[in-house]
Image (spheres, rainbow, N blue to C red):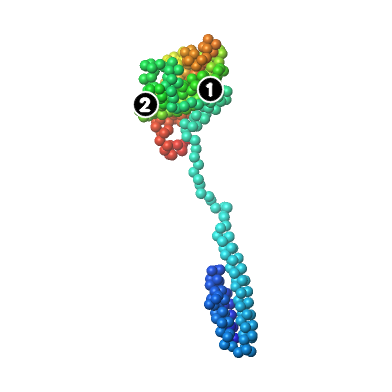
Amino acid sequence: MKEQLQMIADEAMAKMEEVQDIKSLEEIRVLFLGKKGKLTGILKGMGTLSAQERPIIGQMANDVRNRLEDAIQKTRSRLAKKEREERMARETIDVTMPGTVIPRGKKHPLTLVLDEIKEVFIGMGYEIAEGPEVELDYYNFEALNIPKNHPARDEQDTFYINDKVVLRTQTSSVQVRVMEKKKPPIKIICPGRVYRSDAVDATHSPVFSQVEGLVVDKGITMGDLIGTLQVFAKSLFGENTNIRLRPHHFPFTEPSAEVDVSCWSCGGKGCRICRNEGWIEILGSGMVHPKVLQNCGIDPKVYSGFAFGLGVERTAMGRFNIDDLRLLYENDIRFLKQF
Ligand SMILES: [Zn+2]
């Protein structure tokens, strides 16, 4: 039995030398020290020993058990340390490795131009005002001196929600809403989306963006309008830009003018972009019609004002030399990347 114990001890120690992981170590422990293990088997057979032999073998079996338990404990620590080190090595971060490039977005050309426009007017002390895109017919047409059956309604045919509610055709509706609530001095721009029932082509879209401007105070004249638009045109299109006013008719301004800027591409000599005219139309403007002031409860004998409306798409197309308006809405990354 002594030899058996010695063999068991040697076998167990040899296995522990070779073991590579904690799970296999546990299997070794069960094989020798478990309830049905080899050492336990020896102890169970001790009943057959003589009274002299029993304490000697018993002592020896205990020694073997202690040695094995001690060895298992040490092996477990060694394996745990080894596994920890391997995991650390696996999870080491190499900070010099090149990272994954996350593509970075940028602003849409319409947003870029709108930001520039806002910046120019905020610099001149204007505030930004907003109004609803689903608008009452009254604010979009009637209050702006465009009664039912007025021919201007044909040019601005829109989408009707019902008889009294439309998708706004112009940001001018915000003028009325502001003047109703606020008394002069008023100095605002109103950027926003507008709608017309136009078919889509290279220069038309049923949805587009405008920036409306409105100044109302005592003693505002056409001179103030021209000076403001000059500053605006030079800021946006360059210091050498000139403006030109052509008489026009809008129901909500009197007198009214369409405003051209000297071509940003050729400087006025004539080129493809300005169709050899040297000038490019960018906005409509005029002195606020006395009836519109009156509709908003502002006395036209005391106050006067000017207003202008600017197409953001047209300005962006000019700034970036874009020849088809549809490109601005198709969200083709190859196109948008260029700006
Ligand atoms: Zn030109």
Residue 202 image offset from top left, x and y in percent:
37, 29
Q: Which element type, helix, strand or loop, lies under badge 1? A: strand
Q: Is residue 18 visible?
A: no
Question: How many numbered discs?
Answer: 2
Element at label 2:
loop
Which image quadrant is residue 45 in?
A: bottom right
User: Ligand 1 closer than 8 Å to the CB at disc 1?
Assistant: no
Q: Residue at x 51, y 19 (%)?
A: 180
Q: Nearer the viewer, residue 78 or 37?
A: 37
In percent of width and height, residue 291 lies at 47, 13
| Amino acid residing under circle 2 | Asp
Residue 167 vs residue 104, the one in the foreground: 167
Q: Which mark is residue 2?
A: none
Q: What residue would you read off at disc 1?
A: 188
Task: State the residue in front, 283 or 69.
Answer: 69
Residue farthest along the top direction in this orientation: 301
- Classify residue 70 by image quadrant: bottom right
**Residue 118 higher or lower than 80, as above or below:** above
Q: State the residue in front, 140 or 232.
A: 140
Residue 54 in view: yes
Q: Residue pushed farthest left?
A: 199
| Residue drawn 43% across the image and 31% down it | 322
Read off the residue under disc 2: 198
Residue for point 58% across, 82% down: 43
Residue 155, located in which quarter of the rendered image? Answer: top left
The relative height of residue 25 versus residue 286 in the rendered view (above or below) is below
Identify the mark nearer the N-term, 2 or 1. Answer: 1
Label 1 is placed on what type of residue?
A: Ile
In what quadrant of the picture does the N terminus appear?
Answer: bottom right
Looking at the image, is 102 positioned above or below residue 268? below
Residue 47 position within the rendered picture, expressed as x and y whole percent measured from the top left:
58, 85
